[in-house]
Amino acid sequence: MTYQGVLTKMETEFSSPIAYYLVFENDFLNMNQLLGKTITIQFVKYQCLSCGMDKPIYRQGFCKSCFFEIPQAADWIMRPELSTAHLNKEDRDLEYEKKVQLQPHIVYLANSSNVKVGVTRKSQVPTRWIDQGAHEAIEIVEVPNRYLAGITEVALKDHVGDKTNWRTMLKNDIVDENLVEWRERLKQYIPDEAKDYFIETNTETNIEFPVEKYPVKPNSLNIIKSQSYTGKLTGIKGQYLIFEDDTVFNVRSNEGLVVSLSIL
């Protein structure tokens, strides 16, 4: 059985373990059902997620020209403290920016390879944590716009990490942390503008991933360079497919690539 389509990040369902789905234009694959099966992934072409053209992908699934033009790839996406919609100030498209920035946002702690701080729209909880491969997470602050979340994250980054070590996360070489204690420890560093939005009482969310075998030495698959890869799927964590030979494939970082996927 062979399927073909443009890669976008896998859709997820919060269950135990997490359920993963790969969505193509004409196909819908339950990836959990492929665990233990041998799969061939083959690169076909590029397809920018914005213009749809067969042009090399630059970042985030977009070709270079789209990346520097469309609001979905503006700097405030990765750096929420640069958001300006609350000031009625346009960056690339004020209507779009208001729609995304002027909604409830969460500042959270997640433990994937270590405890890190992050920002996401409230509507993306717990999806964001799943995508990062976090086995536990907790909300710290809920604010009414992206800017407040951004400045809170910046303030907390001086006292806790903000990056995930993807190799450590995939090897499951992790330590359980008391995120409630971390939340209380970091409370004093929240900016004055966001202090009133601190979440006083909540518990951490625990996440289980569908992994039969964790890689010992994860080796990231570059499907453009290799053109084709065949391996036995033994797990899914974050947005990574994990194969028996320790090869791992980050679906999200390959958005905008058209691939064929054959189940042998």
Image (spheres, rainbow, N blue to C red):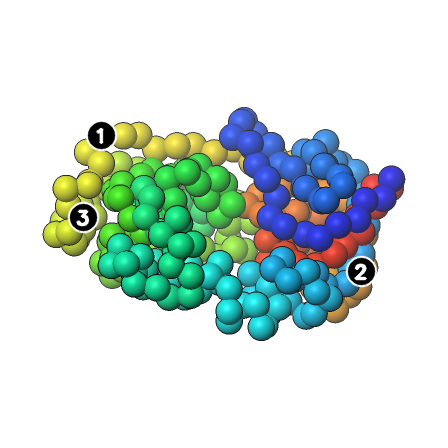
Helix, strand or loop at label 2? It is strand
Q: Horizontal and vertical percent for residue 264? A: 87, 41
Q: Horizontal and vertical percent for residue 176? A: 39, 39
91 w.r.t. 187: above or below: below
Which residue is the site of mark 1?
A: 201
Tell me, yes or no, whether the two marked residues, 2 and 3, touch with CB atoms within 8 Å: no
Residue 54 in view in this figure: yes
Indicate which disc, 2 or 3, sits on the residue closer to the N terminus. Answer: 2
Which residue is the site of mark 2?
A: 44
The image quarter in which residue 84 lies: bottom left
Indicate which disc, 1 or 3, sits on the residue closer to the N terminus. Answer: 3
Label 2 to label 3, Cα distance in Å? 47 Å
Residue 219 in view in this figure: no
> Which is nearer the eye, 202 or 106?
106
Which residue is the site of mark 3?
A: 194
Tell me, yes or no, whether the two marked residues, 2 and 1, touch with CB atoms within 8 Å: no
Q: Horizontal and vertical percent for residue 216? A: 62, 51
Amino acid carrying label 2: it is Val
The image quarter in which residue 91 lies: bottom left
Q: Horizontal and vertical percent for residue 213? A: 65, 40
Amino acid carrying label 3: it is Ala
